[in-house]
Amino acid sequence: MDFCVLGKTGMLVSRLCFGTLTLGPLQANLPLEAGAELLIEALDKGINFWDTAELYRNYACLRLALKKTGAEPVIVTKTYAYDAKGAKASLEKARHELDLDVIPVFMLHEQESGLTLEGHRRALEFLSEARERGYIKAVGISCHTIAAVRAAIHFPELSVIHPLINYGGIGIKDGTAAEMIGAIRGAHEHGLGIYAMKILGGGHLSGAPEKAFKFALNLDCLHAIAVGMASRDELNVNLCYMQGLKPPAQAIKRLAGKKRRLKVETWCIGCGKCVAACPQRALALRGRAKKSAFVDMERCVLCGYCGAACDEMCIKVF
Ligand code: SF4
Ligand code: SF4
């Protein structure tokens, strides 16, 4: 496994970051032990960089893996808080549920622009103070927009960005892949640590994974790439792609029939909360007698935000 210093944070991270959304209740919903075992196997294979979020509801799984190994991976988590009170609650929840005194990287989740960052100013100030007091090592943002990447360099509190980038530009809300790369390069020149999300375009590019990995690995402005994994086969295959090796044919065969999909269960009540939560405008309410949510899989990037917004627990990625 190759390692890289995550920009000005100085933290040494594996170039493959374990995207853990896939482990938890919004996606594979693995039993705690099974999720923890996969994280431990990833640690054994050199992956010391884990991406999570309060939204993913999987802190217990990460905590179990930490407890079993005593390892100290670089963990990134994220909050939707916009004020100091919310940010404090999110930080305390993460510290308590992960059983960590210090969170390596704490992010504002799903930022869109300088305006949204300004709207989260109080939360950002709280996280920045928490960093000065030693509860967090670095503060960052995750985003699906070029505008947020461009804005980040104007907020000195930020030292890490988690932007969406893939060779098809799938999921970028406000421009092309080339424009996103230009923005990422600008942030990289300012010393920010940058690790990519959705290099496989939320499954849309999974027919050409070698090309997707090669594209991301060849971007010298990315320190690492996060990929969601929920099985040993996915872990081993992704490790091969990271090294430019051909993955075992049997593992590829087993994964071939497992393209991730999003399903809306029949008990959907048509409240529309998921529609409002979807950054890709992939959901709509349809039906005459009974409205319910429908997904356009051409637009969906399997980010999981809709599932977290559904109080009825009727959106599943499987
Ligand atoms: S949030 Fe849940 S219940 Fe409401 S429309 Fe979406 S899927 Fe249906
Ligand atoms: S439908 Fe759900 S998983 Fe797909 S892009 Fe929208 S919020 Fe993300």
Image: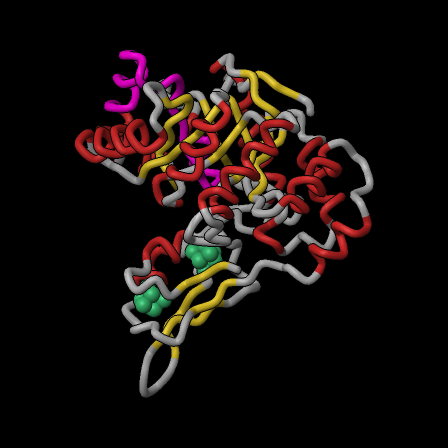
Foreground residue, 258 or 66?
A: 66
Total residue callouts: 0
Residue 69 placement (x, y as % from top left) = 50, 25
Residue 134 within the segment the image draws in magenta? yes
Foreground residue, 157 or 59?
A: 59
Left or right, residue 289 beside residue 61 = left
Residue 82 within the segment the image draws in magenta? no
Residue at (47, 45) in percent of width and height: 21
Residue 2 visible in the displayed image: yes
Residue 236 placement (x, y as % from top left) = 70, 40
As displayed, is residue 74 above or below residue 249?
above
Which residues are drawn in magenta?
Answer: 125-151
Q: Quadrant of the N terminus?
A: top right
Residue 280 visible in the displayed image: no
Which picture quadrant has residue 43?
A: top right
Residue 113 placement (x, y as % from top left) = 38, 38
Residue 317 placement (x, y as % from top left) = 49, 59
Foreground residue, 245 or 29?
A: 29
Quarter containing ligand 2?
Answer: bottom left
